[in-house]
Image (tube, grey):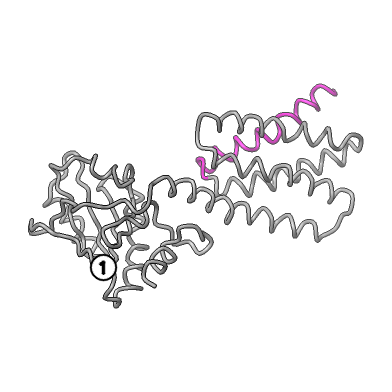
Amino acid sequence: MNIIRTALKITSITFLYLFMGFVFSGNHKWMVILVLIGSFFISYLVFKKEEASPILNGIILILPLITILTFISLFSNFTYSLTYILFLPLSCILAYLFYKKKSILIILFTILSFSFASFVFFPNLLVYNQNNKFNKNTTIKNLALIDKEGNSIKIDSTKIIVLDFWTTSCKNCFKSFPEFEKVYLKYNENQNIEFYSINVPIKNDTLKKTISIVEKLNYKYPTLFYLPEKSHDELSNYGIISFPHLLIVKNNKIKYSGRMETDPFIFINNIYNEINKNLY
């Protein structure tokens, strides 16, 4: 019986993590808060049933998952793991405090802490990790761009230019278009800034076909087209290796290269902050 109980303790929080990963398809924004809340209640039940050795029980509960995530992080993105590694011990400590004190304030603090971990700490950490690998102030050369009539377009180097790169096969690109339009409309009256949606052609794309898609979408911001015969290596020089991808250019130098973030809880690289610090 003790062996079974110990095995359940060792595997419970790890199983919870794997189960939440299956339910939310790896969406850590929701996984974080539910895994932390679940680990809080699992820890509380263990402390309630086994009063002896709270430190040992806490270690048995959280160490397996922390060890697995730390090992995985050695070979992949550490961002996803770090939030769990930092906050799982806190969930265990708070559970023990609640077991001893039975204070509603501990529950409130737990909810606030885990909400912060899930909806503020994790997404900001993720954005920082993904968006700060590119060397800013890289000079951008004239991109090979055309309009829908096939005319060559040169970006005005005297203004701040916001470029949203996308492809026709990118579902997230289409989801981000309404957000890009909101940003465009917010600054549309400012003569010092211009916005362009830049379609990057993929295999089997034709200009006519892509123009048809753009016209059906009917967004207000202008769309330009990257010449299909140009190598995508040029784009990778500017940090563009996946889509959607946002560039903010000022005086022909890249000031921002990364994801477009409009969530008010994402303070790092929020597009409004990035634009404003270059405008003013």
Position of residue 20 measured from the top left corner of the image (x, y, whole percent) = 59, 40
Residue at x 32% of width, y 72% of height? 185
Left or right placement of residue 271 versus residue 177 in this view: right
Residue at x 89% of width, y 54% of height? 101
Which of the 4 image quadrants contains residue 45?
A: top right
Q: Please say whether residue 6 is one of the residues in the magenta stretch.
A: yes
Q: How many marks?
A: 1
Left or right placement of residue 233 versus residue 271 in this view: left
Q: Which quadrant is the N terminus positioned in?
A: top right
138, 39: nearer the viewer: 138
Identify the residue at the far right of this view: 52
Residue at x 72% of width, y 35% of height? 62
Position of residue 167 measured from the top left corner of the image (x, y, whole percent) = 26, 48
Q: Amino acid at mark 1?
A: Lys
Where is mark 1, residue-wise?
159
Q: Which quadrant is the C terminus positioned in?
A: bottom left
Position of residue 139 measured from the top left corner of the image (x, y, whole percent) = 27, 52
Which of the 4 image quadrants contains residue 157?
A: bottom left
154, 173: nearer the viewer: 154
Position of residue 47 measured from the top left corner of the image (x, y, whole percent) = 85, 40
Which of the 4 image quadrants contains residue 67?
A: top right
Residue at x 38% of width, y 48% of height? 135
Q: Please say whether residue 230 is one of the residues in the magenta stretch.
A: no
Neighbourhood count class around disc 1 (C-alpha, 10 Å): few under 14, some 14–19, many 20 upward: some
Identify the residue at the far bottom of this view: 189
Q: Is residue 162 above or below residue 131?
A: below
| SS state under label 1 | loop
Per the picture, the main secondary structure of the magenta-coloured stretch is helix
The region drawn magenta spans 1-27
